[in-house]
Amino acid sequence: MAVHATLPSHLTWLPSIPPPPSGEGSFDPWAEAMVELRAAFLRESRTKLAAVADLVERLARTPSDTAALDELYRRFHGLAGAGSSYGFPEVSRLGAAGERSCAALLKDRRAPGAAEIEEWRVVENGLRAGLDSADLRPGHEGQAVARGPAPHEALVVDDDPDMCRIAARVLEAEGMKVRTAESRAAALAAIAEGMPDVILADVYLPDGSGYDLVEDVRRRPDGEAPAILMISVRNDFQGRVQGVTSGADGYFEKPIDWEALLRRLHHVLDRNRSEPGRILSVEDDPAEASFLRAVLESGGYELQVCAEPQAFEAALISFKPDLVLMDVNLPGFTGYDLVRYVRQNERYATLPILFLTTENALGAHMEAARAGGDDHLLKPVAPGLLLSTVTARVERARFVKSLLERDGLTRLLTHTTCQERAKALVAQRKRSAARSAAWVMIDLDHFKSVNDNYGHPTGDKVLLSLANLLRRRLRQSDTVARYGGEEFVILFEDLSEAEVVRLVSRLLGEFASLQHTAPDGTKFHASFSAGVAMLDPGSMGVERWKQAADDALYRAKEAGRNRVVGAERVVRS
């Protein structure tokens, strides 16, 4: 059904995104910077690999050399952590295999035997072969430039060309590659060429319904993978329910609230690529714990059992579960007591807690609810019911958490979430000081004058354009947050200061080249200043690390703005 559609006024901020370079000799500066970083990674990795070979032979001669084993563990750990970031997933896989082998020996305080030595030699040879075969030329077959996550592919299915144009522009602004189809048959033909990550389909199509299209997709072997959202002029309960039962992940009425649609879309995409989750079971019965482990691990969950109520708080802190299964009858405490205690801490306000008990009286259900439990399952619980309940609760909690952790305007992480990530990173680096971490503080230049001259809605559009650029260009492993007002923070891992300064300066140049439009049609450009601080885990906590980045940012402002300042260098756009 064709419905006239124009770009809503609140979407006029969407930047014009140039198509990616193509053809012989087309190679943008950002990709060039990443190739430089890959080349540096290769050089450093070959040096590290020579050290790995020496350590393996040293342990072959002297298996009891614990210092060599610890150093070998750290070498493998570094390769495992950085390989995928630079486009070498096999390096990460092999490095992780070596890391696990060393960690098991260190944990058990065992010396390596002939089997471990041979395994390490195989890993070393595989790493050498992978690094020696790498080709850095742009466009070369097998080339994998590390420039952030691969863009999602989206398919918009609607017979209204205006709606297709608007939807494509919105999704492209999120960094997606977009195809369009005007009918169910055209959509199925497009899907046959390659399953997209996202499908946005109208309910009414010239040759059938969008509901049928969704069912067609979900019946395919790879049909559970894409995030599917339906759009329609119809806004009744029956239509929404039919959308859910056909297999869609969301239903939105025209004219579309694009911000709500994007929130839902990003949640589904995050859910699809995230791990099933970590479950903490507070259970003192070994037989019951074994049953829970068998059921939940069959569903892909990681289970940790806490048999001693006194260890519950420590398990919460160290394991960071996505859900807690709580027995009621425990030695020295009741499960109700433990849940009441947990609910006093606002950090765990959204943590799902399910009671597992043999008590089915109404009073038990009421006590579970009063204590703060989310559900009450009766033992023995059917495996299917347990898995479906856990899955539903984990997904809902993750959605709520994503809403709380994301800034309402930019959908980047909030100040609070950034601080928590930084604290975790500091604690991690204190245990593994060989790995680097950088705090980048970004502040938009003369942002007050943008608001004063063009109005706050235009200022919001500038903030959104920077947020979208950061989201598109940075890796999934990088923490990107709106720290407050016009300030943004990026936390980088496993990059040197020179690499961070180079990357942020590329971001600065790209952002400064974007053209913004005021309500009166005036065109203008904006820039930012940035300060870079590397973490010294031996002397820095979060506040001192942040202050170092703030000081570097202040120096950038004092030096004239529109530049990146680190401890060692200044780069101007």
Image (spheres, rainbow, N blue to C red):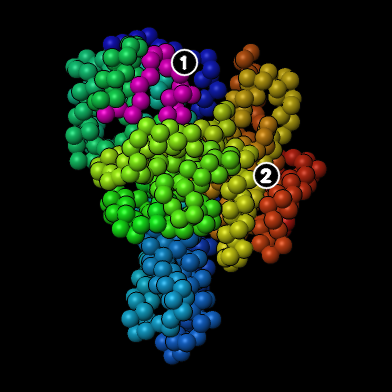
Q: Is residue 255 magenta?
A: yes
Badge 1: how crowded within 10 Å, few (<14), some, or many (20+)?
some
- Residue 131 image offset from top left, x and y in percent: 41, 67
Q: CA distance from mark 1 to mark 2?
A: 34 Å
Amino acid type of the residue tagged 1 in the rendering: Leu
Q: Which residues fall within the magenta stretch? A: 247-264
Q: Residue at x 69, y 65 (%)?
A: 538
Depth order, front residue of 324/70: 324
* Residue 302 in view here: yes
Q: Residue furthest top?
A: 4
Amino acid type of the residue tagged 2 in the rendering: Met
Q: Residue at x 22, y 18 (%)?
A: 209
Residue 393 vertical placement versus 311 (above, below): above
| Marks 1 and 2, the one that precedes in the sequence | 1
Q: Which mark is residue 329?
A: none
Residue 355 in which image quadrant = top left
- Dot 1 falls on a residue whose secondary structure is loop
Residue that label 2 marks: 441
**Image quarter of the N terminus:** top left
- The reply to whether dot 1 and dot 2 touch (C-beta < 8 Å) is no
Residue 200 in which image quadrant = top left
**Image quarter of the C terminus:** top right
Q: Nearer the viewer, mark 1 or mark 2?
A: 2
- Residue 54 image offset from top left, x and y in percent: 47, 82
- Residue 464 image offset from top left, x and y in percent: 57, 29
- Residue 561 image offset from top left, x and y in percent: 74, 40
Q: Residue at x 38, y 62 (%)?
A: 93
Residue 83 vertical placement versus 329 (above, below): below
Depth order, front residue of 474/408: 408
Residue that label 1 marks: 7
